[in-house]
Image (spheres, rainbow, N blue to C red):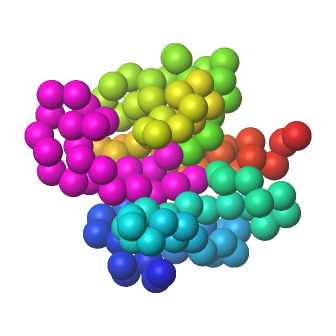
């Protein structure tokens, strides 16, 4: 899948960033969910990110039912509870909420900060 197939500008720019920095392309693992993709490290096959399309109210309970693209990335368990703020950073969607966090790719967080989260996640996925 090319970066242009994602809907949000941030998702497209992240796909380009990950390809340029880590030489990784998104992998679409689920035929029933073609809008969802993951990135994994080449050396150990561990996931370090996922772009998923979900209803917004799955991330922010009580919000509307529009579909949004989100990014799930790994996070150091000891700080996860301190950085989840319910505005820009949320508990990992459909992931272990102690080890993963979610960002909605709607511009509320700068791309620079999101890239830093991806870089951190890539490093965490490389640790034993």
Magenta residue span: 49-72
Instruction: Please state which of residues 105 and 60 is positioned toward the viewer in this rendering.
Output: 60
Q: How many marks?
A: 0
Q: Residue furthest front?
A: 32
**Any magenta on residue 55?**
yes
Instruction: Please state which of residues 29 and 114 is positioned toward the viewer in this rendering.
Output: 29
Q: Can residue 36 be seen here?
A: yes
Residue 32 location (% of width, % of height): 39, 67
- Quadrant where the C terminus sits is top right
Left or right for 44, reference 30:
right
Q: Can residue 119 be seen here?
A: no
Residue 26 location (% of width, % of height): 55, 70
From the viewer's perspective, is residue 89 above or below residue 6? above
Q: Residue at x 61, y 62 (%)?
A: 39
Q: Residue furthest left?
A: 64
Instruction: Please state which of residues 22 and 55 is positioned toward the viewer in this rendering.
Output: 55
Q: Residue at x 56, y 45 (%)?
A: 73
Q: Residue at x 11, y 40 (%)?
A: 64
Left or right for 77, reference 80:
right
Which picture quadrant has residue 29? Answer: bottom right
Which picture quadrant has residue 98? Answer: top right
Which picture quadrant has residue 43? Answer: bottom right
Residue 13 location (% of width, % of height): 44, 68
**Any magenta on residue 92?**
no
Left or right for 59, reference 49:
left
Residue 16 location (% of width, % of height): 52, 74
Q: Residue at x 15, y 34 (%)?
A: 63
């Amino acid at each position: 899948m090319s970066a242009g197939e994602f809907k949000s500008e941030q998702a497209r720019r992240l796909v380009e960033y990950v390809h340029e920095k880590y030489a990784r392309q998104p992998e679409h693992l689920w035929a029933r969910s073609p809008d969802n993709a993951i990135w994994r490290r080449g050396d150990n096959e561990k996931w370090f990110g996922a772009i998923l399309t979900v209803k917004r109210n799955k991330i922010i309970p009580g919000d509307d039912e529009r579909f949004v693209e989100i990014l799930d990335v790994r996070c150091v368990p000891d700080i996860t509870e301190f950085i989840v703020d319910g505005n820009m950073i949320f508990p990992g969607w459909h992931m272990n909420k102690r080890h993963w966090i979610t960002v909605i790719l709607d511009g509320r967080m700068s791309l620079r900060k999101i890239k830093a989260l991806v870089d951190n996640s890539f490093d965490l996925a490389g640790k034993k």
